[in-house]
Image (tube, rainbow, N blue to C red):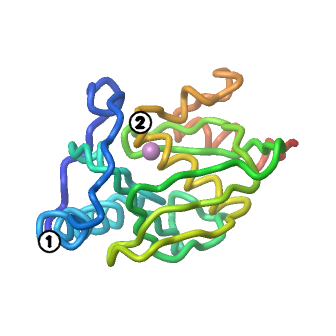
Amino acid sequence: MAILKVARLGHPILRTRAQPVPLDEISAPDVQRLIDDMVETMREYDGAGLAANQVHSLKRIAVIEVLANPRYPDAPTVPLSVLVNPVVTALTEETEDGWEGCLSVPDMRGLVPRYTAVRLEGYDREGRPIDLVTKDFFARVIQHETDHLDGVVYLDRMRDLSTLAHIAEWQKHWLGRVEQDD
Ligand code: NI
């Protein structure tokens, strides 16, 4: 396993749409190794998730995991999830604002509206189908990661860039002071 270099905002690959992985290639050693390396990279940098284009691959793969995470101290936990060719469908018109950061936008936080419930379809790392309904924080992380695979970053989703904050200022001025709205 290896810790991969993470592309930062401005690298064109973050604005490039990732391509579906053919189902008979999910088990290929290079795909399995990429998944292992993505998990290791996400954990090394305390990310809540990581999309393949963030590590310079255009395969449609994302990994998600939220344990006790120092970057998201109040976040609920999300088990390790490997998503191949994920497709997200909103199940509600309702959105909720929540703070997001991104390993490709280091040391920043911003308030981002996301659908509160989404259906997630795709495949796991064994090629088994995934079809589940996710809500709240899990749904938020999934929307963030699948956006990456479409070349979209959270800044594009912000309604008001005045909440964009360096993490040191965010901790002083914003943490705990903005209630989620509907
Ligand atoms: Ni991100």
Real-space CA distance between mark 1 and mark 2, rounded to the nearest whole angstrom: 24 Å
Q: Secondary structure at mark 1?
A: loop
Q: Position of residue 67 (x, y in %)?
A: 51, 74
Which residue sits at x=48%, y=49%? 145
Q: Position of residue 148 (x, y in %)?
A: 43, 41
* Tag nearer the camera, 1 or 2: 1
Q: Secondary structure at mark 2?
A: strand
Pointer 2 residue: 105
Pointer 1 residue: 1
Which residue sits at x=86%, y=42%? 181
Identity of the amino acid at label 2?
Answer: Val
Quarter of the image with the N terminus in it = bottom left
Quarter of the image with the C terminus in it = top right
Q: Residues within 10 Å of mark 2 (few under 14, many from 20)?
A: some
Which residue sits at x=51%, y=71%? 130
Q: Residues within 10 Å of mark 1 (few under 14, many from 20)?
A: few
Q: Is residue 52 left or right of residue 97?
A: left
- The residue closer to the viewer here, 165 or 42, is 42
Q: Is residue 70 above or below residue 172?
A: below
Q: Which mark is residue 151?
A: none
Any atom of ligand 1 within 8 Å of the CB at mark 2? yes
Q: Position of residue 168 (x, y in %)?
A: 53, 40
- The residue closer to the viewer here, 109 or 27, is 27
Which residue sits at x=20%, y=70%? 32
Identity of the amino acid at label 1?
Answer: Met
The disc, 1 or 2, on the residue closer to the chain's N-terminal end is 1
Q: Position of residue 176 (x, y in %)?
A: 76, 50
Ligand 1 rendered quadrant: top left
